[in-house]
Amino acid sequence: PELFPKFSEELEIVDNKMGEVQGVPLPEATCEIWEQIYNFQAREDDILISTYPKAGTTWMQEIVDLIMLDGDVKKSMRSPCFVKVPFIELYPKPMPSGVQAANAMESPRLLKTHLPTQLLPPSFWEKNVKVIYVARNMKDCMVSYFHFQRMNQALPHPGTWNEYFSKFTAGNVPWGGWFDHVIGWWKIKDKHQILFVFYEDIIEDPKREIRKISQFLGKELREEVLDTIQHHTSFSTMKENPMTNYSVLPSSVFDQSISPFMRKGKVGDWKNHFLVAQNIVFDEEYQKKMEGIGLNFRTEL
Ligand code: A3P
């Protein structure tokens, strides 16, 4: 708990400048230490959660942490989600970088990344690390990212919804384009130990997905444990949990009065944002880009 006031003081000044690595927009601080990030040393028993931003990363972190802990809720609340799961490519100056945090951590480690496949530190492939990739339909991702860029002072301001719509569809947002990311990970999923999970599927049947994830991790959990994990990782529980709702971060970083981190947690909120004309343009472009990929998302349940 002593850690938190310190966080607040040190994080008063927030830098939202962006740079890029191989054409992918990333925070400037990330670019500064890119060599270190790219040379990150994975360990065989690491578990990596990989996502495009806003696809359900935090949700998956909680699910996997609880699976590893056999459903021990008390232990899962040992520290905030962003402390217990290092975000490898983040460098929230003057706090330690994700690489430093991960290096200092005992195994087995749970790690987080938003990097597209071409930028992932090669050590993850070399060590054949298990990866859980969470994918969320592009329309809801766009809406969620729009609100996130409004409240996250460490990212550029998104502008109006109309402006953001163009930026996002062009891939001109932090961590680059949704298409490159999702298609890239989809295409390599059978070459490595990658479990591809859909946000919409977890919403539809959380217990089924939690069971699938635990089996992928080599764990057979009892029904009661699956129920406990399902309950503890529900949207309403995570919204109230200070270890998962990011309320321990000061408003100079996440201004939750603009938009809460645990915002809606639904499939189909895009319908409250997309204009009819935008939806037509979007669907056309989307179909062209996704043709023949074999990757199908649900945008409503
Ligand atoms: P919304 O903005 O649509 O509500 P990430 O963790 O990758 O940043 O993703 C955040 C998104 O996942 C937010 O979406 C957030 O509300 C949603 N989310 C977080 N925990 C969730 C849960 N337990 N159930 C459903 N959605 C959740």
Image: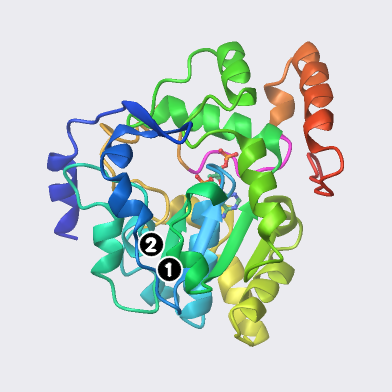
**Residue at the (32%, 38%) spot, across then down:** 31
Q: Estimate the x, y position of residue 179 in percent, counting from the top left.
A: 67, 37
Q: Main secondary structure of the magenta part?
A: loop
User: Which element carries disc 1, helix, strand or loop?
Assistant: strand
Verify CB contact (< 8 Å) between mark 2 and mark 1. yes
User: Which element carries disc 2, helix, strand or loop?
Assistant: loop
Task: Give the extent of the magenta segment.
Answer: 262-268
Q: Is residue 129 above or below residue 183?
A: below
Q: Where does the N terminus fall, quadrant-wise?
A: bottom left
Q: Is residue 84 above or below residue 182?
A: below
**Residue at the (61%, 12%) spot, across then down:** 162
Q: Earlier in the sequence, mark 2 or mark 1?
A: 2
Cα separation, mark 2 vs mark 1, equals 5 Å
Between 72 and 177, the residue placed more toward the observer is: 177
Mark 1: few/some/many CA within 10 Å (<14, 14-19, 20+): many
Mark 2: few/some/many CA within 10 Å (<14, 14-19, 20+): many
Asked whether residue 198 is in view, the answer is no
Residue 19 lies in quadrant: top left
Between 223 and 274, the residue placed more toward the observer is: 274
Judge left or right: residue 246 versus residue 51.
Answer: left
Mark 1, residue position:
110
Mark 2, residue position:
85
Query: Which amino acid lies under the numbered mark 2 shown in the image of this protein?
Result: Val
Query: Which amino acid lies under the numbered mark 1 shown in the image of this protein?
Result: Leu
Asked whether residue 235 is in view, the answer is yes
Q: Estimate the x, y position of residue 54 in percent, counting from the top left.
A: 55, 42
